[in-house]
Image (tube, rainbow, N blue to C red):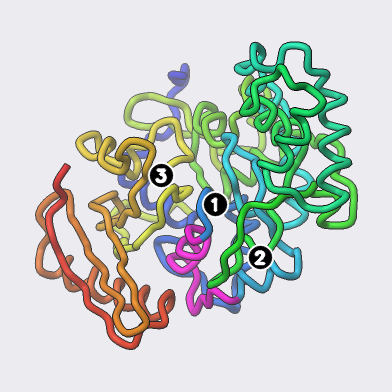
Amino acid sequence: MASKTTNPVLGNRALNRATLDRQLLLRRAPKSAMSVKGAVEHLVGLQAQNVKPPYYALAARLDGFDPEELSALMASRDVARLVTMRSTIHTHSADDCLTLRPLVQAARDRELTQFRKGLAGVDLDRLGALARELVEEQPRTMKELREALLKEWPEADPFALSVAARCVLPLVQVTPRGLWGRSGQVTLTTAEHWFGRATEPVPAPDGTVLRYLAAFGPASVKDMQMWSGLTRMREVFERLRPQLAVFQDEKGVELFDLPDAPRPDADTPAPPRFLPEFDNLLLSHADRSRVVTEEYKARTWKGNMAYCTFLVDGYLAGIWQLAETKELATLTVQAFGKLTRSQCDALAEEGERMLTTMTSATAHDIRFGTFSE
């Protein structure tokens, strides 16, 4: 929405540096300032469609990160994996699992309308009660849950029943799924059962808007809506306006921010960072040009697959792949454009750091190439 008043303008690089700072990507947070659990909460969760991305996301953001730290939090049920924003799996703290999911439940309810035909004749209240009984009796795979629900509604579409179960209920993926270095199929129970306490009443969205701005701001109303999957957030921002700083971008779009949040100078150096597939940085704004240039925006996906990416000077600059054996970890870096020698050296240093942190291989090899579509 175009601003009707003259607000201070934040250029693209200024937005880039501010967002990187909030995302802990301009400089890693030291352990003395932020714990692993604190980072998960500050970032309002981590994209977790696959098991490894949350670990790599934190390795890029926390100084001295050890993957076993996040794994231990999962094992102790201090954090868990469940569907929240944008109908995707996120890793959240236990508190956020029990509060954010009720907040975005309206979006999950809207999602179900796409499956009305496959759910004809299905009583969703009955489905929720039956699914809860099943997964709280013992954790179930989605296949087991779907087969049990089909006995009750044999004419329903099996996939639609699966979607309905995860939309109606806050289903947590139980461990060992999600633990570092462990394998396990997706097995589900309710958040209430997993954490041993009830979900919170649906909270007012105001607090979550402020948390979003702290982690992703400055941002527009549409940005927050894209991140959360919620709609009609304009009135919330208007309610908060008196306590927010208001800017506009170079296109005239109104941006909101916390008054005391860091907004570094646009010329602040931004070191290279290796990000996992589906990283929050690339998916949490309606206008992603603060990190992704127009010419590169279609290069992070191929079909339904997302690539791991890296940043140079704060912007998306290419993709990376990792091949690992017990003896050798090989990092292949493919740039979208030409890199300078100093940029390659900085990427190699950052890559070595990532390999040391995230692999147990005794030797490392870093190779540079050019991206080919």
Q: What residue type is labelled 1?
A: Ala
Q: Is mark 1 on a helix, strand or loop?
A: loop
| Residue 234 location (% of width, % of height) | 61, 22
> Which residue is pictured at 65% across the width and 30% down the height?
163
User: Is 2 placed left or right of 94 in the picture?
Assistant: left
Q: What residue type is labelled 2?
A: Pro
Relative to 133, residue 323 above or below: below
Which numbered tag is attached to residue 155? none
Q: Is mark 2 on a helix, strand or loop?
A: loop
Residue position marked by numbered label 2 in the rendering: 176
Relative to 150, residue 119 above or below: above
Mark sitting earlier along the chain (2/1): 1
Q: What residue type is labelled 3?
A: Leu
| Residue 6 location (% of width, % of height) | 43, 24
The quarter of the picture where the C terminus appears is: top left
Relative to 354, residue 260 above or below: above
Magenta highlight on residue 189: no
- Separation of marks 1 and 3 at Cα, in angstroms: 14 Å
Mark sitting earlier along the chain (3/2): 2
> Which residue is pictured at 82% across the width and 25% down the height?
152
Region rendered in magenta: 52-68
Q: Locate residue 292: give its quadrant.
A: top left
Q: Residues within 10 Å of mark 1 (few under 14, many from 20)?
A: many
Residue position marked by numbered label 3 in the rendering: 282
Q: What element carries label 3?
A: helix
